[in-house]
Image: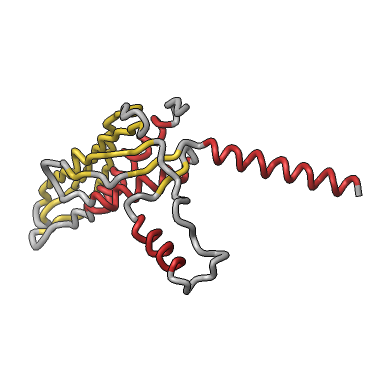
Amino acid sequence: MKTINRKFALCLMIFLLCAAAAEAKPRLAVRTFDNKAQRGADAPASAITEMMTTELFNSGLFSLMEREKLDYVADEIRLGQSGLMDPDTAPEVGKVKGAQYSMTGAITLYFYNASAGVVPIPGLGGVGAASNTAYVTLDIRVIDNSTGEIVYAAAEQGASNQTMGGLVTKYGGFASGKFGGLLAAATRKSVMKHVESMKRVDWE
């Protein structure tokens, strides 16, 4: 019996420590990024914001507060107040936690560059090679909501390269690849650079 009680006490202590650690995380709201890229493809600001939110969640740095989709929360509260929902499980008004910090961002570069060359081969056409590189720069700021002070500001660039080779005949060429995948890979590199930089910030 004593062994069982000790195990229970140990499990309870671990649970309380984990709960305290989770509560100690700074609360962050991520706002939808602005597309300020002047050249290249049209940057999907909403998708890039979602990528940043996901990677921040995976990092465990913050307790993330949903702000852009609070309409869903409001719908649940209104449904609870309508009497159609079990009052024991209905969400309560005034329980949405405030964010200590807000993240804003701008996509300042969202660009890919394609280059190709052909070495002629008599009678065949030639051997070709293409190099495709995508560049993405994210300018991120984190603001202390209580003071308005900027506590993090950085611009990080990600790049992704794909080199392809193939036979170029006199009747056609070779595929240049899908730039969307390259841009996504470059975006994630930029996002991860920011996440790693934020790990070095004192959020107290």
- Left or right? Give the position of 197 relative to 43: right
Residue 131 in sight from this viewpoint: no
Question: At 10% across and 48% down in the image, what residue appears?
Answer: 120
The colour scheme of the drawn protein is secondary structure
Residue 173 screen position, x and y as percent: 13, 57
Task: Classify 81 as above or below 174.
Answer: below
**Quarter location, residue 77:** bottom left
Q: Residue shown at 55%/41% (left/top)?
A: 22
| In-front residue for pair 121/10 | 10
Residue at (38%, 46%) from the top-left corner? 53
Q: Observer-nearest residue: 146 or 37? A: 146
**Residue at horizontal 42%, vertical 26%?**
201
Q: Position of residue 185 (x, y in %)?
A: 31, 46
In which image quadrant can residue 156 be found? top left
- Residue 132, compared with residue 26, is above or below; it is below
Q: Does residue 27 appear in the picture of this structure?
A: yes
Q: Position of residue 38 (x, y in %)?
A: 11, 41
